[in-house]
């Protein structure tokens, strides 16, 4: 029997320390420290001073397999996820070939299961080839072995309102959710950086906030009309938060995610012209980042999603306009949330569980993730040392790519262990 005893951790960082016994994939017992006899052969994790949370769920990960296995594979991405405290990730569909059919989504799902470090849920494309012209086979993907629960053309916006309407209708009938990459393409032709004072002074073509806000507003109206469920990817502007608050006030079934980088980084970084900071949507202003933090704290923005986007050196270490957008996120997400939300008192650890585990699991409809820390519940867990710090080095991260915008930064909070259905998938910075 696979048993693990976690000794002296505080559940959600609250109350007195407890011992947690994990057996047969579930939380078998929770009790006062030292009372339980250590079962023979059990692995013991000394966790005094540490915080135990449900394992994190990432609704937005790019694993690059199939097609760009030089930048990330399902295996390396799964390792990064486990080391980052994740027990489930959603792998975006912009692979090559695109995950717009049952064969590709089943491949991704199967590889995830074989590797077994994290539950890999493939996201199905909304439109065939991400071309935005006709719907992909949503029903076939939902009913495949992979059991697709989320559809998205992420990287591209579903710009045609009729296609978006139909996607919302079908998806709702299937019990799935459409995640929109909100970017009105007519407003971002040639866009390189957040449209504002900094971009104009430095000579970047501007990317207006309204490109995001107009699509979010439109899609909330469409979701309301269709009685459908909508999820908005990587929100980045103050105006988007206003639109979400308005729509939620009307009872629209909309949820939204924010990335760690939009919580911390701003367009102040444009001054270096370093494409490590190029990302879609672009880094916005300090006022926008501040609003993201507030909206995450008060729940208008539901959850954190990484938009983990590995890229090869040659696709990042080049002139700005030619560089691909995106940055790594899986192994740094917890620390950026600790830095931007926990340290300033905007979220406590229970709040972190809500935005990194419970809400994402609910949005995607995962029955065995984001569960309460209670006896009989699946042992999908992350153990965190809240007082430890570490220094980020891209070359030391598990991803094949190294494009982290946090290189050299000292950050709070370290994942000490991750457990997937009671099995240790990461411990002290190492797999397994
Ligand atoms: O920065 C981004 N990179 N945003 C996206 O929406 C797509 C992603 C990617 O696939 O690299």
Image (tube, rainbow, N blue to C red):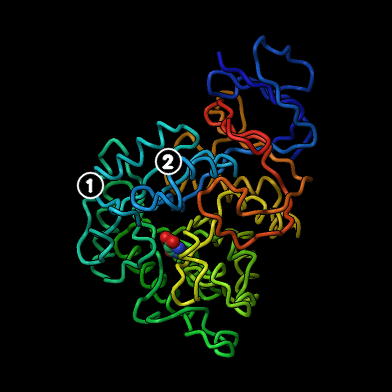
Front-lying residue, 24 or 280: 280
Front-lying residue, 21 or 318: 318
Q: Is residue 232 visible?
A: no
Q: Disc 1 or 2, which lies upstream in sequence?
A: 2
Task: Report x, y in % for residue 372.
Answer: 59, 35
Label number found at residue 120 = 2
The residue at 59%/48% (across/down) is 397
Task: Report x, y in % for residue 205.
Answer: 47, 85
Residue designated by label 1: 139
Q: Residues within 10 Å of mark 2 (few under 14, many from 20)?
A: many
The quarter of the picture where residue 286 lies is bottom right
Task: Report x, y in % for residue 252.
Answer: 41, 62
Where on the image, by quarter, is ligand 1? bottom left
The residue at 62%/36% (across/down) is 430
Q: Quadrant of the C terminus?
A: top right
- Secondary structure category for the residue under label 1: helix
Q: Is residue 348 left or right of residue 170?
A: right
Q: Is residue 217 left or right of residue 343?
A: left
The residue at 60%/52% (across/down) is 395
Q: Is residue 332 left or right of residue 385?
A: left
- Secondary structure category for the residue under label 2: strand
Q: Is residue 220 left or right of residue 171?
A: right
């Amino acid at each position: 029997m696979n048993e693990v005893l976690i000794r002296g951790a505080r559940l959600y960082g609250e109350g007195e320390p407890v011992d947690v016994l994990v057996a047969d994939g579930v939380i078998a017992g929770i009790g006062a420290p030292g009372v339980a006899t250590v079962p023979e052969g059990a692995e013991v994790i000394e966790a005094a001073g540490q915080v135990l949370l449900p394992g994190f769920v990432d609704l937005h990960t790019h694993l690059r397999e199939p097609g760009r296995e030089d930048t990330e594979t399902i295996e390396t991405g799964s390792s990064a996820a486990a080391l980052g405290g994740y027990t489930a990730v959603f792998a975006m569909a912009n692979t090559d070939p695109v995950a717009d059919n049952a064969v590709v989504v089943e491949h991704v799902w199967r590889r995830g299961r074989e590797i077994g470090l994290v539950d890999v849920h493939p996201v199905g494309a909304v439109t065939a080839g991400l071309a935005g012209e006709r719907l992909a086979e949503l029903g076939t993907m939902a009913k495949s072995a992979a059991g697709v629960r989320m559809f998205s053309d992420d990287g591209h916006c579903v710009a045609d309102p009729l296609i978006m309407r139909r996607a919302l209708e079908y998806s709702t009938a299937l019990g799935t959710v459409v995640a929109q990459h909100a970017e009105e393409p007519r407003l971002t032709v040639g866009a390189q950086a957040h449209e504002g004072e900094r971009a104009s002074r430095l000579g970047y073509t501007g990317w207006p906030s309204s490109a995001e806000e107009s699509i979010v507003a439109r899609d909330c109206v469409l979701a309301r009309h269709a009685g459908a469920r909508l999820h908005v990817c990587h929100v980045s502007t103050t105006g988007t938060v206003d639109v979400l608050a308005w729509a939620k006030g009307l009872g629209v079934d909309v949820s939204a995610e924010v990335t760690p980088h939009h919580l911390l980084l701003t367009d102040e970084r444009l001054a270096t012209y370093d494409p490590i900071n190029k990302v879609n949507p672009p880094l916005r202003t300090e006022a926008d980042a501040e609003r993201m933090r507030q909206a995450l704290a008060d729940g208008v923005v539901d959850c954190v999603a990484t938009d983990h986007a590995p890229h090869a050196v040659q696709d990042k270490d080049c002139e700005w306009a030619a560089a691909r957008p995106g940055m790594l996120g899986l192994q740094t997400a917890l620390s950026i949330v600790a830095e931007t939300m926990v340290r300033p008192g905007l979220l406590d650890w229970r709040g972190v569980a809500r935005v990194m585990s419970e809400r994402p699991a609910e949005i995607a409809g995962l029955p065995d993730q984001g569960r309460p820390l209670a006896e009989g519940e699946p042992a999908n867990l992350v153990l965190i040392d809240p007082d430890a710090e570490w220094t980020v080095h891209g070359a030391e991260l598990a991803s094949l790519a190294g494009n982290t915008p946090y290189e050299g930064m000292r950050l709070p909070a370290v994942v000490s262990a991750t457990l997937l259905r009671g099995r240790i998938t990461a411990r002290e910075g190492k797999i397994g």
